[in-house]
Image (spheres, rainbow, N blue to C red):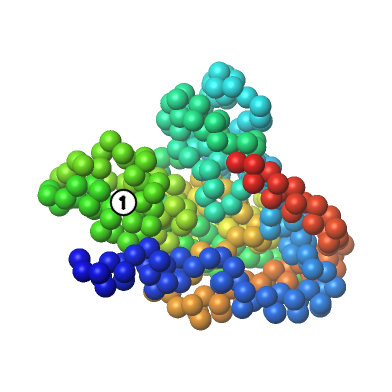
Amino acid sequence: MNFISRIFHSNFFIKVRSWEYWPFGILQAPLFPYWLWLSLKTRSLVYFSASNPGILMGGMFGESKFEVLELVPEPYKPKTILIKLPVTVDGVLHKLQESGLIFPLIFKPDLGERGWMVRKIKNPQEIENYLAEIKIDFLAQELVDLPLEFGVFYVRYPSESSGKVTSIVGKEMLSVTGDGTKTLRQLILEKERAKLQWETLKQVYHDQLSGVIPSGEKKELVSIGNHCLGTKFLNENHLISDKLSASFDNISKQIEGFYFGRFDLRVANVEDLENGRVKIVELNGCGAEPAHIYHPGFSFAKALGVLWRHWSDIYRISAENHKRGVAYISFQEAREIYQKFKALTARS
């Protein structure tokens, strides 16, 4: 590979060429004037706090993942417990045994975003490693061993009897496929999406990098379905149907104070998705995005249009809830929640 090719295929230019890798603020910046206009209309900079009255700040920031998941009816979620710090490895193992949870498990911080500190834990040694890093309370969650993972975005206006699904994102885990001649290191560095994760992957697979992957063998590199960890997000909006919307409307109406947000879930097949036979691993409020916009090749202009509608829906739902007696959180209170959130997450 010559000098020009190396430059063009550097991590910097990979990110420049594909806006899906751009910093979060760049995508949101063009929408700032619209948010400010909506704030003036509602006379509240944090009007979105009324979008989901059952969730702190409507789910924009600072909410407990465990408390939000507790709102979801039991049949739709995996077994999950909250582990409070300080705690030892033996303490964690005792809590897991009490709850009937067995390895492998998913550990994730009770506060956090964009895949931060979400890990697959397979043994006590990995618990010890996790405790050495995490500085805030965290969730231990049953691993949902179902093949398909989706993010389903749901919207319901308080003035209307039924809601609808507006976005479905499919998740393709980061993987490489062997050709019988190249090492794992070569396969990772030749795949742009994997190359961006090299600093992490070279530590996780340090003892396997020189091994040759057999021809046709697919090796999953990351099992956590998060875009920041290399997962490819796919636009699956063609799966939206009246039946699917009705299924998620039924689920959502069982969640007190929820009108707007994204269900991150696993499911056996598309038919089960349409019929609402799902396992919800996380419920995100108004801070979530309709993540189908991160599909490779989805235009930046089109993504801005989707987010414009997204903020319009937040405004309408919040304003309607406010008219029904839901108070907007004061700016001072919101500031205190945000400062606490940033202080806690910055500790890890």
Q: Residue at x 19, y 41 (%)?
A: 211
In the displayed structure, does residue 99 sit left or right of residue 196? right
Q: Residue at x 59, y 22 (%)?
A: 88
SS for dot 1: strand
Residue 72 seen: no
Q: Quadrant of residue 65?
A: top right
The residue at the far left in this view is 181
Q: What residue is pinned by disc 1?
A: 175
Quadrant for the N terminus, please. Answer: bottom left
Instruction: Give residue 96's position: percent from left, percent from top.
Output: 55, 24
Q: What amino acid type should be assigned to the residue bearing mark 1? A: Ser
Q: In this view of the protein, which residue sits in the foreground, 284 or 258?
A: 284
Q: In this view of the protein, which residue sits in the foreground, 244 or 57?
A: 57
Quadrant for the C terminus, please. Answer: top right
Instruction: Give residue 302's position: percent from left, percent from top.
Output: 50, 79
Density class for disc 1 (Cα within 10 Å; few <14, some 14-19, many ≥20) is some
Q: In this view of the protein, which residue sits in the foreground, 142 or 180?
A: 180
Instruction: Give residue 280's position: percent from left, percent from top.
Output: 54, 47
Instruction: Give residue 334's position: percent from left, percent from top.
Output: 80, 57
Q: Residue at x 58, y 58 (%)?
A: 262
Q: How many marks?
A: 1
Residue 201 seen: yes
Q: Residue at x 55, y 30 (%)?
A: 131
Q: Is residue 298 above or below residue 280?
A: below
